[in-house]
Image (spheres, rainbow, N blue to C red):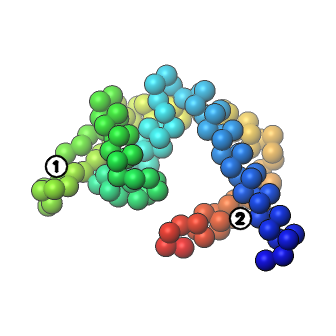
Amino acid sequence: MSDSSNSLAVMLFSEIMTNDQMIRNRLSRVLPKGMEISHFSVLNHLAGLGDERSPAQLAKNFHVTRAAMTNTLSKLEWAGYVHIRPDWDDARGKRVSISPAGSRARDVALAAITPMISEMVSDLGEDKVKAVLPVLRDLRVRLEPDG
């Protein structure tokens, strides 16, 4: 790889990491009190699935350790946002589903963040956002462990 290619790669990842940090800071400020980004992410994922998942499946989906996912799920269960039950097919496993309270919390959080993210898209322009999405998706696929 040439020096200019290396420089381009460093600039790309620097921009992505800086954007990630700034987005997380903004999201944290507008999410409902007590809700963390990880909580919203899991609730949003489960709401989109409409089905149960194991903690291990969720950990894999979010590219976190099982311990980290267990910690997040414990907090969500304590808040009443998820139901965690034994896996009837595998006595060692558990199954996680979103509760009605979790669906409501997810909807409240989504309503809180939507104006901020909509404003960003509007400020950037829909054409720019549409142009960058395929690049970001391709990068994500290449970064996936199986990619």
Task: Tell me: 114 left or right of 90.
Answer: right
The residue under label 1 is 86
Residue closer to the observer: 136 or 121: 136
Q: Residue at x 46, y 56 (%)?
A: 63
Task: Tell me: 147 left or right of 102.
Answer: right
Residue closer to the observer: 52 or 91: 91
Placement of the N terminus among the 4 image quadrants: bottom right
Give the residue type that dot 1 points to: Pro
Placement of the C terminus among the 4 image quadrants: bottom right
Q: Residue at x 33, y 28 (%)?
A: 79
- As drawn, the residue found furthest toward the bottom would be 1
Residue closer to the observer: 38 or 43: 38
Dot label at residue 74: none
Q: Residue 46: where, in percent of width, then height?
A: 39, 48
Q: Residue 115: where, in percent of width, then height?
A: 66, 32
Whichever of callouts 2 and 1 sits on the residue coming sooner in the sequence is: 1
The residue under label 2 is 135
- As drawn, the residue found furthest toward the top would be 33
Give the residue type that dot 2 points to: Val
How much space separates mark 2 and mark 1, taking CA atoms? 40 Å
When the figure is inspected, residue 62 is found, relative to residue 32, above or below; the finding is: below
Q: Residue 50: where, in percent of width, then height?
A: 36, 50
- The quarter of the picture where residue 80 lies is top left
When the figure is inspected, residue 36 is found, relative to residue 69, above or below; the finding is: above
Q: Residue 19: where, in percent of width, then height?
A: 71, 45
When the figure is inspected, residue 65 is found, relative to residue 102, above or below; the finding is: below
